Image (cartoon, rainbow, N blue to C red):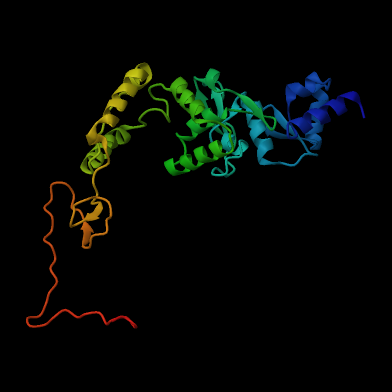
Amino acid sequence: MARGEVEMAALGASQHGVLRLHQLLELGMSEATVRRRRRAGELVDVQPGVVRHRAHPDTWRSRLLAACLSTGGIASHRSAAIVWQLDSISGGIVDVTVGGPSASRRRGVVVHHSTQMDRADVIKVDGIPTTGAARTLLDLAAVVPPRLLESAVDDALRLRRTSWPELFAAVLSHSARGRNGCWHLNARSFEADPMRWNRLTTVGCQVYPFTWAFFVDEPDELCRIIGTALRRPSARAPDRGVRGCRGCGRRRACRRRGRQREPPPGEPRPPRRRRRQVAGSRPARRPPRPGSP
């Protein structure tokens, strides 16, 4: 086997069997040889400028890497979550993120355009250039339902792919108006906030609204306000009717009889139930114990 053949086989094995055409030329293979092998079926076209050696099977990872090599992008969103082995995300979708509008459409590939490629924290996982785990979760927030996103975050934390400080730093570094996953996506999401606010206020919670600019620029003041609010007596959880004693009025259980549920604040206490007794009758007495006088 010629030296170029050995190098091509080694490179193909490290790239899931896919190769760029210019990589074959760099290995010393002429353009005529490449065209002949493509006509013979030894090299199978996968994406523009990318071929796969027929000795390697057609897999999802080979298609994902071929899309990355063809567009010059990186695996992201759902594809990156699968590469990171997050159990909550599955399927055969190929998501690739590129910088700017340079890449056009690709067959069977969802191409995302980003202006924040310098913050993607690119890392090779199984030979595939992939967004960092924190950036992957941030991208997932724009394409999957909230419950699926929560499961993916749990998987990433459980597998130690990332941590809460890294996720918080990713949100801060990528926050921008119009950035899916960090801001309101549409007017419907914006209008839903007051409804959530009203529901929390109805059950007795105190809501403190903060803008994103205040959250980012004034973290110390934010912590001071929250700390002051937590120290106030009104910050305690609303009374849901704690089970207490009817006789002494204590909230905890005691040995007195007649326990009943305390009403919420502001509502009158229900009247005390009296035992009904028929006129002229006497309450039944317990029978004496055996051997007692």
Q: Position of residue 43 (x, y in %)?
A: 77, 34
Q: Is residue 35 left or right of residue 3?
A: left
**Residue 11 appears left or right of 103:** right
Residue 28 percent across, percent down from the top left: 84, 20
Depicted 58 relative to depicted 1: above or below? below
Quarter where residue 11 is shown? top right
Q: Which one is in front, 214 or 132?
A: 214
Picture mark count: 0
Quarter in which the C terminus is drawn: bottom left
Residue at x 18%, y 57% (from the top left corner): 246
Viewer-side residue, 202 vs 212: 202
Q: Is residue 109 visible?
A: no
Residue at the extreme right of the image, as rendered: 1
279 or 21: nearer the viewer: 279
Where does residue 29 sit, x and y in percent of width and height?
A: 83, 22
Report which quarter residue 289 is drawn in: bottom left
Quadrant where the N terminus is found in the figure: top right
Asked whether, in this view, residue 251 is left or right of residue 52, the answer is: left
x, y percent for residue 62 = 69, 36
User: What is the residue that sits farthest to the left in this orientation?
Assistant: 279
Q: Quadrant of residue 133?
A: top right
Q: Is residue 207 above or below residue 262?
A: above
Residue 140 in sight in this render: yes
Residue at 46% across / 40% down in the picture? 150
**Which residue: 82% across, 29% down?**
10
Furthest residue to the front? 293
